[in-house]
Image (cartoon, grey):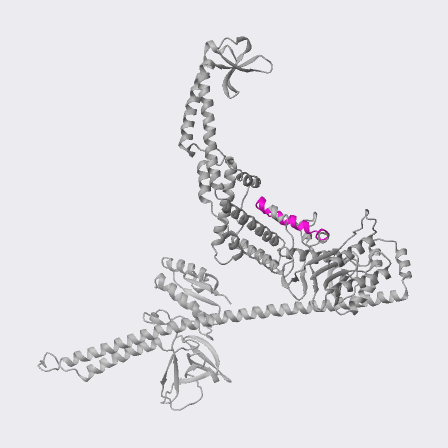
Amino acid sequence: MQAGALRALEFDRVVEAVNGFALTPMGAERLARLAPSTDAAKVAQLLAATSETMRYLGSNGALPLRAAADLPETLGALAVEGRPLEALRLLALASFLDGVDESRAAIRRAPGAYPALEAVSGAAASFKGESAHVREKIDPAGDVLDTASPELKLIRDRLRKQRSRLRTTLESYLRGKETAKYLQEQVVTERSGRYVLVIKAEHRSGIPGIVHGTSTSGASLFLEPLSTVEINNDIVALEEQEAEEIRRILLALTNAFRARPSDLQRTIEAATELDVLQARARYSASIDGVEPALTTDGAFELQAARHPLLIPGMGAPGVTKPPVPVTIKIIPPATALLITGPNTGGKTVALKTAGLLALMAQAGLRIPAADGSRLPVFRTIFADIGDEQSIDASLSTFSGHIANIASMDRGLVTPALVLLDEVGSGTDPIEGGALGVAVVDHLRRRGATVIATSHYDALKTYASTTDGVAGAAFGFDAETFAPTYRLVYGSPGRSLALEIAARLGLNPSVITAARANLSAREAQLAEHLAKIDHDMRALEHEQRLATREREQLHEAEGRMHQREDALRQKEETFRRRLNEELETQVRQARKEIDDVIAALKAKTAAMASGTGVGANPLRHPSPTTGDTGAARTDARAAVDNVATRILAGDGASSEPAASSEIRTPQSSIRGVEVGDRVIVGGLGLEATVTAMHDGTADLDVRGKRMRASVRDLRVISSDGGGPAAARVRVNVELARGRESQDGRGRESQGLPGDSRPLDLNVIGCTVDEAISRAERFLDASLLTDQRVVRVIHGYGTGQLKRALTGFLQQHPLVARFATAPPEQGGGGVTVVELKD
């Protein structure tokens, strides 16, 4: 990749930012050499690895890599045979290797999820044993422990003993009446590795001993008493033995690492590569980067791209506002894009953004853009941006640009990206425009992807009339002429030199004179461009409105689908529970009927046994017709009781899961009359007609009043009650169960169309029974539009109310609940409001 392009696009500043995320000095050193690759397969691999590492860090946190700044020097010292590492460097090496091992173990916790990280970390070797030995023998402060070896412990025990003897002997001189008068200071100090006293120079002979030096003033002497010479000699000798033993221990620990050079090298390389990966990933995350798709057809598309150095905190000092995103695209068959627009409008930033993001992607970095971005992999990238004149080479601005373009032409290898800022500028506008057209046309015909900026009309015309060349212009505010930094495709753009000059405060008379100097053709062209800009802005505004409306419609459809799914799920849940309860009720009914039949058989057999052969007719009288009739009557009553509880008649469900048909005698099929017992069609409710109106009837449904259409009523009996052939459909009720047996559970079950308040009476129930019944009661309430129900629990000890309160707080169907007003039962009743 060309050094001039890397410099012009400031790729080095991106590399510096990435380097700031390194965790090891080896990783930082490698990242400093970060460069774009020109191999498409390698670029794809780099981007995939960066994205994978981002996913890992997002789910698992940072890798536990760590390394001291002088780790490279430590690793270099390992190469010197016979040289032990210092204790602190051994600790740092062990910590580094432990971090690599911990990173590998962390990655392995999700096998197969992060193949690139697994491949890199899998190459590392484990040094757990060697690291453990280091920590066993060296404390965190870097001191070798007494327990590092038996010899070291013995030496240090003897040292402590001798030092104690020496201290006692010297302190006797400090405390002695005869010797204290010779001392200059009441201290023990050290000179030349020997412990000495500080005595007055005039009392040199007061204490026999060896003088190891004098003070600067000469008034004091540093004297080693003869009585301590032998002790001091022993201490010096023991310290030398201690040092030698410590050296032996450190050398043994060092050699343990030194004995595995290939494992150590593989581990260092793995750690370095892991560090590079995590640095690329963390930088990519810091700029909200996306992985661009790599194209092979030359398509170049950056959606909502941002210049990374203009993102706050990413390199540019003083930047506090995020950059305005820009979309840059060259879609085949187009191979060139010409960007026009007002000065200071963002053309050069867009050019740099396009080039820098292409370099970043080819270096394995995700780019600050939106999803849908895609880029080719370029073999060469050239950039002619800014003033490249060279004083040493005696080149003008124009000459510098031309020399740069000539160099591009010589070194161009496709696929190539060429960025030209103000192509053809620096000379006569007519000649410059003609030259700019020729340069762009020549480079794109050679196979390059070209992005150029210009103010020249010749280039605007070229973009508007040439196949394969796209045009775009940066917009501006129609009232203030301030740049909007938004790129509008299909617009030739206006330079707005006069308008911007006026906005910047240039004398109005100068502006007027400049307008007068415009030729008629130039003025006409400017007017034409202004009209095109106006039309383009109007069209863009309409497109934004249409897009917003489509988004709102899509959101509304999404909310509708969610509501439908929720209702469908509620319905399915209700049907499932209905079927489960129905099956339970049917099994219970069959069992009870079987019990009745068995009891009837047993009673009949007992009656019959009294008349068997050999029986005494006086003691066992034969059953009479009245006796057997009474038995049959009792049996029929028991069966009817079961049927009454199971079949409809009290709280039938809205969609019966099972039914029976009972023919009722009726003289004829006729109209509905006051006093008739009827079934309300579709609801399964049994009611009594209390009044008739025009097409409707007032009904009494278990003490509650309702009105229904006569078309929905079916007569099942009347006050007159003649024989008939009409049918009554009896619906099985949800969740009736055993509750009818003891008289409880006669509350409303939340039937659709039932207008009376929904009550559940659990007085007399245990806590478990009350919670179970309340659960079924709320489920059944799904079928009604009424959203306020009541639970009657009474006062008692308050245990039922507390249990129900906890249950209602957790129930997903409950919006809120409260104690009923005094007129509705007060503290003995809880009013529950259900969610919509």
Residue in front for this viewpoint, 69 or 368: 69
Tell me where residue 41 appears, x and y as whole percent: 60, 60
Up-down relation of residue 624 to residue 291 (above or below)? below
Locate residue 172 relative to residue 438 in the image: left or right: left
| Magenta residues, start to end | 6-27
Residue in front for this viewpoint, 760 or 474: 474
Tell me where residue 831 appears, x and y as whole percent: 45, 64
Tell me where residue 334 appears, x and y as whole percent: 72, 67
Locate residue 569 relative to residue 415 in the image: left or right: left
810 within the magenta span: no
Tell me where residue 813 appears, x and y as whole percent: 47, 65
Up-down relation of residue 8 to residue 250 (above or below)? below
10 within the magenta span: yes
Residue 154 appears in view: yes
Residue in front for this viewpoint, 89 or 761: 89
Which of the 4 image quarters holds residue 638?
bottom left
Query: How many numbered badges does the structure rendering display?
Result: 0
**Image point (55%, 48%), residue name:** 269
Locate residue 149 relative to residue 553 in the image: left or right: left
Which of the 4 image quarters holds residue 574?
bottom left
The N terminus lies in which quarter of the figure? bottom right
**Image point (37%, 72%), residue name:** 736
**Image point (50%, 58%), residue name:** 113
Q: Majority secondary structure of the magenta segment?
A: helix
Residue found at the far bottom of this picture:
668
Up-down relation of residue 539 to residue 11 (above or below)? below
Residue 717 appears in view: no
Residue found at the far front of this picture:
81
**Image point (84%, 53%), residue name:** 505
